[in-house]
Image (cartoon, grey):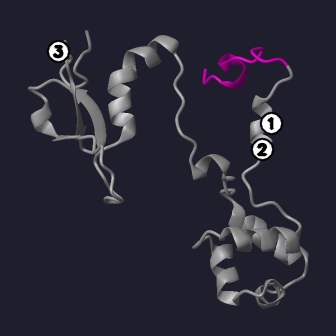
Amino acid sequence: MPQCEMCGAEQASLTTTKVEGAELELCSSCTDFGTEVRDESTSSGGSKYSTSSDTGTSSSSSSSSSSSSGQSTRPRDMFDDMDEIATDYDERIRAARESSGLSQEELADQLNEKASLIRKLERGDTLPTDEVQRKLERALDISLVEGQSVDDADWDSGDAGTMTLGDVVKRKD
């Protein structure tokens, strides 16, 4: 018998309800805390932001089958394919520019960007767009993507599981 996701009461039927942005399967006494999600079978374009969802109704009807199979996949989103920009991107840009012997204005001209953008990037005031990031990486022969740092290399060992917390921690005696 399914349980209410809010109070835990076992009920024969639960209602999909949106509570503070989350869709929950709730019993009749807990549905007052949110808005009932209704399935609109006639979709005539409708609103871009509809409270009905195919996942809400299919999860209630197939929740027992999905939990029995043990297979849970979340939809891929745009962040799965994005590289993470390095936290020290500003220092990398400045060091590479100075080692190339370029001024901020000369680098900006070479990239066909404004010098004020280069100043903001080197101060860390703004993140580079994907296009500017590619231009900087090509022009300065650097990588602005978060990679493995020297500190992270200490954690990597050839054998998985051979290093323990005791190998890393320094005791104060």
Is the residue under label 1 in contact with that under label 2 (CB below 8 Å)?
yes
**Residue drawn at (67%, 49%) of the image:** 81
Amino acid type for the residue under numbered disc 1:
Ala
Mark 2 crowdedness (10 Å alpha carbons): few <14, some 14-19, many ≥20: few
Residue 64 pos. (x, y %): 39, 15
The residue under label 2 is 148
Identify the element where label 1 is drawn: helix
Alpha-carbon distance for marks 2 and 1?
7 Å
Q: Image height check: is 98 above or below 169?
A: below
The residue under label 1 is 153
**Residue drawn at (34%, 23%) of the image:** 61
The residue under label 3 is 9
Amino acid type for the residue under numbered disc 2:
Gln
Residue 131 pos. (x, y %): 72, 72
**Residue drawn at (59%, 52%) of the image:** 78
Q: Image height check: is 85 above or below 138?
A: above
Q: Image height check: is 150 above or below 59?
A: below
Residue 73 pos. (x, y %): 54, 30
